[in-house]
Image (tube, rainbow, N blue to C red):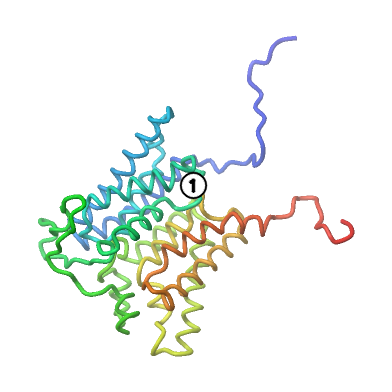
């Protein structure tokens, strides 16, 4: 009997592959985020560029060092940590001290990703974990919106280069974000300004059109479940629409709720994270509806004007339970009934 020339590999299902490796998918997500990032740099200038670069560098260096310290091959080449850095930077306000950005990057990778085992094991979106810790630790810096000078491409706000653990000094503070102005002052913002990102806010609260186009690009390549962002946006539109019909003087219009804040970025690029979201189509819809309801509840009745970050993190926590709730029936089996099968 001759020995086998090839090793017989036995693997569990599923046996059908998409043909796309992890690094390929992650690279295309980075490509989809490039227009959004470029527009944020156009809108906010050098401070936005440095914020994004610092966030990416902190995330990459942290992951590389943690891999080496644990005797593992570095995983920075799969592009996932670049996505974490980009998303973290896009959730932060322009003018935030760069040392805070670096701290957020270390927390996002170390606490939000590596602590759970790395890529594929983290239950929560790492970028939002880093942002949530920064929000709790430096609430003033995370809710301060400096005025962007006309020479934003040749100068930096004083706060950007503030020394570590020193309270940053802002040259000038702009007005409230559209959500804050609506919640606390009952002031609305023009739809065109919201659509094209001509407002105060985080670096990722920019052009909604570019964010949606990035989502369409990923969905068309089957690198993102479109059910999640569609479920979130439809739920927000329907829920806020009902409230607006009941009392238009108190509750904002659905269009305002959709275009303001970080909803678009969160729904398209964060809630749809393959690791933190359910695996079944029905589960994705339930997950999206849950996040959409939480966003409106927090925005309308919560103490803070924005609720996207907390809604997605709570959705991440519920995702495994949603999967258990809507497990598909095994092919060829019948549903069990009380007293028999």
- The image shows residue 282 at horizontal and vertical percentages of 62, 61
Position of the N terminus, as image quadrant, is top right
Q: Position of residue 289 (x, y in %)?
A: 54, 68
Q: Left or right: 3 with respect to 122?
A: right
Q: Residues within 10 Å of mark 1 (few under 14, many from 20)?
A: some
- Name the residue nearer the viewer: 20 or 61: 61
| Residue at 67 percent of width and 37 percent of height | 12
Quadrant assignment for the C terminus = bottom right
**Residue found 36% across the figure and 50% down from its top:** 31
Which one is in front, 310 or 178? 310
Relative image position of residue 14 (x, y in whole percent): 64, 42
- Outermost residue to the right: 339
Judge by depth and name the residue closer to the eye, 62 or 275: 62
Residue 73, quarter of the rendered image: top left
- In the image, is residue 157 above or below residue 274? below
- Most extreme residue toward the top is 1
Which residue lies at the image location 10% right of the left edge and 56% below the top edge?
A: 154
Is 164 placed left or right of 37 in the picture?
A: left
For residue 256, what is the image quadrant? bottom left
Q: How many marks?
A: 1
259 displayed left or right of 223: left
172 relative to 58, above or below: below
Residue lying at 26% horizontally and 60% vertically, measured from the top left: 40
Which secondary structure lies at badge 1? loop
Q: Which residue is mark 1?
A: 122
Q: Is residue 135 above or below residue 31?
A: below
Question: Where does residue 191 sit, x and y in percent of width and height?
Answer: 32, 78
């Amino acid at each position: 009997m001759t020995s086998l020339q090839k090793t017989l590999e036995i693997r569990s299902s599923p046996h059908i592959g998409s043909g796309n490796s992890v690094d390929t998918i992650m690279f295309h997500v980075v490509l989809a985020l490039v227009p959004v990032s470029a527009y944020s740099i156009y809108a906010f200038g050098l401070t936005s560029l440095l914020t994004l670069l610092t966030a990416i560098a902190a995330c990459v260096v942290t992951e590389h060092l943690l891999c080496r310290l644990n005797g593992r091959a570095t995983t920075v080449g799969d592009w996932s940590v670049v996505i974490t850095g980009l998303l973290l930077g896009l959730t932060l306000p322009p003018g935030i001290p760069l040392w805070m950005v670096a701290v957020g990057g270390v927390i996002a990778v170390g606490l939000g990703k590596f602590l759970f085992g790395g890529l594929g094991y983290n239950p929560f979106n790492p970028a939002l974990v880093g942002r949530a810790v920064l929000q709790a630790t430096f609430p003033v810096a995370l809710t301060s919106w400096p005025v962007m000078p006309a020479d934003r491409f040749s100068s930096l706000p004083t706060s950007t280069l503030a020394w570590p653990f020193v309270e940053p000094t802002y040259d000038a503070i702009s007005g409230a974000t559209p959500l804050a102005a609506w919640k606390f002052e009952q002031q609305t913002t023009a739809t065109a300004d919201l659509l094209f990102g001509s407002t105060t806010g985080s670096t990722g609260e920019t052009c909604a059109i570019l964010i949606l186009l990035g989502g369409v690009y990923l969905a068309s390549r089957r690198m993102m479940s479109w059910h999640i962002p569609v479920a979130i946006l439809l739920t927000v539109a329907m829920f806020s629409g009902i409230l607006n019909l009941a009392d238009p003087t108190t509750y904002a219009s659905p269009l305002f709720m959709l275009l303001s804040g970080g909803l678009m970025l969160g729904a398209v690029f964060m809630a749809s994270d393959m690791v933190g979201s359910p695996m079944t189509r029905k589960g994705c819809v339930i997950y999206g509806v849950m996040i959409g309801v939480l966003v409106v509840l927090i925005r309308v009745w919560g103490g803070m004007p924005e609720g996207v970050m907390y809604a997605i993190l709570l959705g991440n926590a519920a995702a495994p339970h949603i999967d258990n709730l809507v497990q598909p029936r095994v092919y060829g089996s019948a549903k069990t009934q009380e007293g028999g099968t």
